[in-house]
Structure formats: structure tokens, C-alpha cells
Image (cartoon, helix red, strand yellow):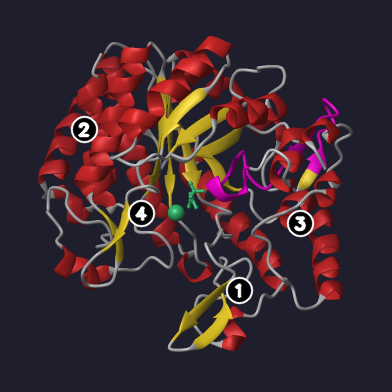
Amino acid sequence: MTPTEHKNWTKSSWQKFTALQQPTWPDQEAVDKVLTNLALLPPLVFAGEIRSLKQLLAKAVTGDAFLLQGGDCSENFAQVTAPNIRETLKVLLQMAVVLTYAGGKPVIKVGRIAGQFAKPRSSDTEIIDGVELPSYRGDMVNSAEFTPESRNPNPKFMLKGYNMAASTLNLLRAFTRGGFGSLQRVQAWNQEFVAHSPMGRSYDRLAKQISHAIRFMETIGISSEAPQIHQTELFTSHEALLLQYEEAMTRMDSITGDWYDCSAHMLWIGERTRQVDGAHIEFLRGVHNPIGLKLGPTYDIDNVKRIIDVINPDNEPGRLTIITRLGMKKVEKALPPLLREMKKEGFNIVWSCDPMHANTYTAKSGHKTRNFNDILSEITCFFETHWSEGTVPGGIHLEMTGNNVTECTGGAHNIVDEELAENYMTSCDPRLNAEQSLEVAFQIADMIRS
Ligand code: PEP
Ligand code: CO
């Protein structure tokens, strides 16, 4: 198929295109059974919610809102527990407060959560000590353990993924709507292990100021029961990688007649699957969700323009977020020509910075890691480049967790290579821990203070 053949979209038209990074399922009949089942299950999110996210993202195009997107590189079924979900939410809420206070504009909170269960891999197989097995492709496909049984793709994991996403989302909705996310509780989001750190203390000072402001409002008779104070909103997102699953979750909205992928509010296209004539672009062009597009340093400008023409032909603001992941060494050279050209074309884009994926290296201890200063230098360069090009730095995309992990080096506690083994929990890429995440928020706050 060529791009000109991107014509009549249906939720299964991607099947005529080449789909990279798909599992090789051993039993096609079992797959079909799961997909039929999934297609009958209730949607996880609703079209109306997806539309409100798109409207908010439209504001991030012009700099009237800021996108904070973050969560695990890869969620694990075994880690879907109330404390884990709560701790991730807490850090996202803390970061959002820090950024809102500094930037004086709404922060759109989008988790890499409730569905981030499928991973692209650099190779189909992995060889350890001469044994070759299929690569781990995320909990929705197979299991991480290096045994033939674990690595065998099991389509039932797609159903399990749906159920895990549903229970995660259920708890998130309860937390965000039921008072946990109320600004009146802003001080309670500081975790114990963060509270006594320099970041925790800075946060505590800020939280106290907000509490004072709310008390002042109440004193003069403005109710703090307003939903803006009492409730918060967290949207969900994941990489739309497993196209069979995404197709099964795609439904027509009864109000508008438009198609929405109801597995999450926002979906992104990974660096490895953004071929303009590929199945992922074909699938995502037809659903009306906000779409993220990851761009690495080897991007080709004409190719990017062609992708944009296919994904956002009407130049609808909020539809497309470009998530650059260029690396601290390359960002300074690679970002300006891209911004210039897209500005010249007049494309409406939310520009978001993923400072994680091009800053990965292997530590002496053998752990895959990222250094806090590298992450920060890509972020800083991202903001400065946008400001000098007259474009809008609209968001940040992080791999992070609310837990006290030791996966990225550096930060206020200066985690060193030798300490990575202490609490290295990720089954995929290294995440910022709660304190490092908060530190990123404070650093950005310093840059955007209005
Ligand atoms: C990711 O976000 O986990 C990922 C694999 O990113 P990228 O597609 O940018 O490499
Ligand atoms: Co990752």
C-alpha cells in the first residue's frame, strides 16, 4: 500500500498494511476468540472525555495549557495494586501543582497508565547464554521471565490487560473524583520518603501557600466545594502498538458517528512504528482521539510532513502532539530545523519533550539507566529552542513512578551506578523515582515562572 491508498478507513483497514512489532501468536483461533470477546466488552473511556482532552490539548498548542504526561515505561500486571496506582497519581498531582503554580496555566494530566502493557523491541528474539527465546513484548503479550513458557505469546493476556486497565481506571476515577485529588489535600500528597528531602520541603512550602489561599477564599465566603478545587482529572494514554487489541476497543460514538479508540483517551505512535505507509499510521488516522507521535533524531522532515498530512489533514488543534525524543547530545541540532519547518507550514502541534528515550545507557553494573542531568539538559534545550524559534514548548513526557526506585542516576540524592541495584524494579526502561520526578517539575517551574 502507498500513502495515496490511505482512502477508505475502517477499523480493520490497517490489516492491509505492514504492521511492525506485532507478536507471533501460536494459535490464531484463540486470538480470534479473545478479540470477539474484547469487542463486546464495555469501552474503557468515553468519546465525550476524549473530546474534552482534545479541547484541552488545543490550548497547549497556543501555550494556554501545559501537558504533563508520565508513568511507567511498561506497566506490569503484578504491579497493578492500589498503593502503586495511588503513589503514581500522587506524584503526578504534585508535579501538576508545582507547574500550575509556576506557569499560571492549567496543566493537563495524562498518565502512561491503565493500558501501557505492550512494548516494541529492537529484536524479535533474545539470546542469553546461547539460548534464544522470543523477546518480552509487554504483559499483554507474554511474560518477562526468561523461560520458553513465559515468553510464549498468550492472547488471553489481552483480555487480562483489558481487565487490569479497567480496574486501574476505576481506582483512578475514584481517587480523582472522590476527594483524594482535592486541592484541600495538597499537603497530603507528599510521600513520607520525599517529605524530608530538599524537594519534599520545597513542595511542602508550596502546598502550605496553596492551603492558605484556599482558607482565605473560604474566609471571604467563596466555597471550596467548587469542582475545580474538589476534583481533578487524569486522562489515560499508552502506545497504540497491538493493533488487534486497539481495533477491538474501537467503537462508533453514538452522538457524532465518529470512531474512537476507547482503550485510552490519548494514544501515541512509537518511534519504531511510525512508517507513513505502515499499519499503525493507517489505524490511528481514522480514530478521533488525540494522537502522539514520537520523533527521534533520525527523523526526515518530508516524511514527518507526510505523516502529519495523513494523521491531521484538517490541521485540527489538539489532534496531534509531537513528542520529540532527540537526546541531550542531538537536541540542539535536530530540534530547530523541525520547529522552523512545521511553523512555516502552519501546523497546529502540541510540542512535548520526552527527555528519556534517547538518553539511555548501560551502567557499569549492567543496568539500563539514564542520568538526571542528561534528562534535564534535554528539557532545558527543548524549552530554550522553542523560545528562540518562536514556537511553544507545550508539554513533557516522562517515564516515572511514585515509588522510591533506583533506576535513573543523579538527582538531589545523587544516585550512583553502584546504587542502581538497590531498588531496580522496572521490567523495561528506567524511570524517575518520586523525588527525581518532583525535582524535574521544580526545574521546569523555574524556567516557566510567569
Ligand atoms: C516508550 O515510550 O516507551 C518508547 C518505546 O518510546 P519510543 O517509541 O520513543 O522509543
Ligand atoms: Co520506554
Identify the element where label 4 is drawn. loop
Classed neighbour count for the residue bearing mark 2: other residues with Cα under 10 Å, few (<14), some (14–19), many (≥20) = some
Q: Badge 1: how crowded within 10 Å, few (<14), some, or many (20+)? A: many
Secondary structure at badge 2 equals: helix
Disc 4 to disc 3: CB gap under 8 Å: no
Callout 4 crowding tier (Cα within 10 Å): few <14, some 14–19, many ≥20: many
- Name the residue rendered at 24%, 38% in the picture: 376
Quarter-of-image position of residue 200: top left
Residue behind mark 2: 443
Residue stretch rendered in magenta on the structure: 251-274
Q: Nearer the viewer, mark 4 or mark 3?
A: 3
Q: Which residue is identified by label 3?
A: 244
Which quarter of the figure has residue 428? bottom left
* Residue depicted at x 62% and y 66%: 140
Mark 3 crowd level (few <14, some 14–19, many ≥20, 10 Å Cα) = some
- Residue assigned mark 1: 142
Q: Check mark 3 vs ligand 1: CB closer than 8 Å? yes or no.
A: no
Mark earlier in primary sequence (4, 3): 3
Residue highlighted by disc 4 = 401
**Mark 1–mark 3 CB contact (< 8 Å):** no
Q: Disc 4 to disc 3, how far (Cα)? A: 28 Å
